[in-house]
Image (cartoon, rainbow, N blue to C red):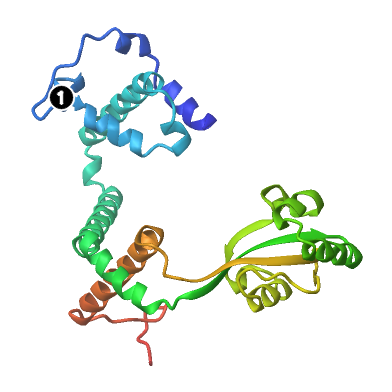
Amino acid sequence: MPRLLLGLALAALTVSAVNAQTPPTMAPGGDPVIARIDGQPIHRSELQATMRNLPPQAQGMPMETLYPMLLERIIDLRLIGSAARSAKLDDDPAVKKKIAEATDRALQEAYLTRQVEAKVNEAALREKYKAYAASVPGQEEVSARHILLKTEAEAKAVVVELKKGVDFAELAKRRSIDPAASSGGDLGYFTKDQMVPEFSQAAFSLKKGEITEAPVKTSFGWHVIRVEDKRTSGPPSFEEVREELSEGMSREVIQDMLKDLRGKSKVERFNLDGTPRTQ
């Protein structure tokens, strides 16, 4: 950011003159002319495109700060480009090569983008989701509360209290050393792989409403567990996996496109020294 601001500041020697400009005239289509150089216009869209290429932290700066500095930067670059053309640098072989490479990159990006956008749309994503959802098996989930204690003796004493009818949630709030104590030991729904094996084995072996007869030992301490509910969960929602599906479909589109392009072309490969490959 400091280097960016320094570069912008060096280009903003005439900020006061820019701020004193009269309101910009409007170009066709609502793209205002924000400056002219020898009669050639600079439109607001060019400034906006420049802003989109700034680092995220710079894009967050107030427009009042960025506008004058970016405008002067665009003016400077336009003047340099004009001077380069006047010097016939666009005929220089090295410059031509760079221009061709930049053109190729822009074409490649545009082609890939359009190929993906044509096939990875809302309808296609939802069709992909249907197949995905059908392939994802339901998972058993348990909703449970627990009371975590430091010693086995403390845990056994809690089991005795519970058998006498003491409310589990209230006892968890008073006795548990787990952060979930404030919510009565409520852990919500979880699958087997979301808990340590000893805890999961005990919780999933209980029926709804049952409490562990003997405390369960894990690396966290001693647990007394009560199962509140059991259910079989469905697949993640469309919105939850939308990004993942989009990325996967985009990769498939590009792979298929490249396979097709390679199939239509004759590709020859050589060794680093230019000699033919034997294989």
Most distant residue in the left direction: 28
Position of 214 with respect to 96 (left or right) is right
Residue 4 locus on image (x, y percent): 47, 31
Q: Quadrant of residue 143?
A: bottom right
At numbered mark 1, what does the secondary structure look like: helix, strand or loop?
A: strand
Q: Residue at x 24, y 35 (%)?
A: 87
Q: Is residue 270 above or below residue 60?
A: below
Q: Is residue 45 left or right of residue 216?
A: left
Amino acid at pointer 1? Gln
Q: Position of residue 14 (x, y in %)?
A: 36, 13
Q: Residue at x 64, y 64 (%)?
A: 144
Q: Residue 133 or 103: which is nearer the viewer? A: 133
The residue at which mark 1 appears reads as 40
- Image x and y of residue 139, in percent: 50, 75
Would you say 273 lies left or right of 117 here?
A: right
Q: Quadrant of the C terminus?
A: bottom left
Residue 10 lies in quadrant: top left
Residue 55 % position (x, y): 44, 38
Neighbour tally class for label 1: few under 14, some 14-19, many 20 plus, Cα within 10 Å? few
